[in-house]
Image: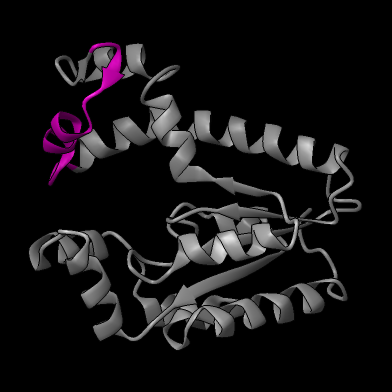
Amino acid sequence: MAAIMFVIGLTGSIGMGKTTTAQLFAEKNVPVHDADAIVHLLYEGEAVAVIEAAFPGTTKNYKVDRSALGQRIVGNADALRRLEAIVHPLVRHAETQFLEKALNSGAKVALLDIPLLYETNGDQRVDAVVVVTAPAEVQRARVLERGIDSAQLEALLARQLPDAEKRRRADFVVDTSRGIESARAQVQDILSAVAKMPKRRK
């Protein structure tokens, strides 16, 4: 798999513009794997029974009740670890299938959109990391527009590496605060650069 396809890891905190940036890569015919979307599918399928067994009462109508599950794990590190032990291997399996399909389709570049890329050591599985960023005040305004309050935002950010640290460790940074055309140009620059970069996965 590593022989001919370059794998980019895309990450960034909530409200930074990661979803939009992933769409810009897709516009350039880069296959995109959305880890969050896979989790949503698992919560309506393969993971339901095992999550119900581990956290009784957190599923309803053959789906995981994300609110009930969230209440069960919030502030409980052991519960979070148990959930991750269930979900992460399933997400990794889906990721492997995605990469095989992308490779077989002849893709030269594929993108893994992983919100907690650094926190889960996902950067070890990719050839380059792109961090999506925006100034803190822009991020906060975007998040509050979604109906998430300041306390919820702070709780989310507390589980993640700080934006400055992500940017420091990144191979590339996309600043989404300057509008869509600027972001599109930054994505094109990244694709031009990775075409000349060595692959670093083993």
Q: Is residue 20 toward the left or the right of residue 98 in the image?
A: left
The residue depicted at 88 percent of the width and 76 percent of the height is: 196
Q: Relative to the observer, which residue lies in front, 198 or 182?
A: 182
Residue 200 on image: x %, y % = 78, 63
Q: Is residue 124 toward the left or the right of residue 68 in the image?
A: right
The residue depicted at 37 percent of the width and 21 percent of the height is: 44
Q: Looking at the image, can residue 171 be seen?
A: no
Q: Quadrant of residue 78?
A: top left
Q: Which residues are magenta?
A: 61-76
Q: Relative to the observer, which residue lies in front, 51 or 191?
A: 191
Is 92 colored magenta in this rendering? Answer: no
Q: Quadrant of residue 126?
A: bottom right
Q: Relative to the observer, which residue lies in front, 9 or 158?
A: 9
The residue depicted at 50 percent of the width and 53 percent of the height is: 114
Residue 182 on image: x %, y % = 57, 85
Q: Looking at the image, can residue 126 be seen?
A: yes
Is 63 colored magenta in this rendering? Answer: yes
44 up-or-down from 111: above or below: above
Q: Is residue 80 toward the left or the right of residue 113 in the image?
A: left
Residue 163 on image: x %, y % = 38, 77
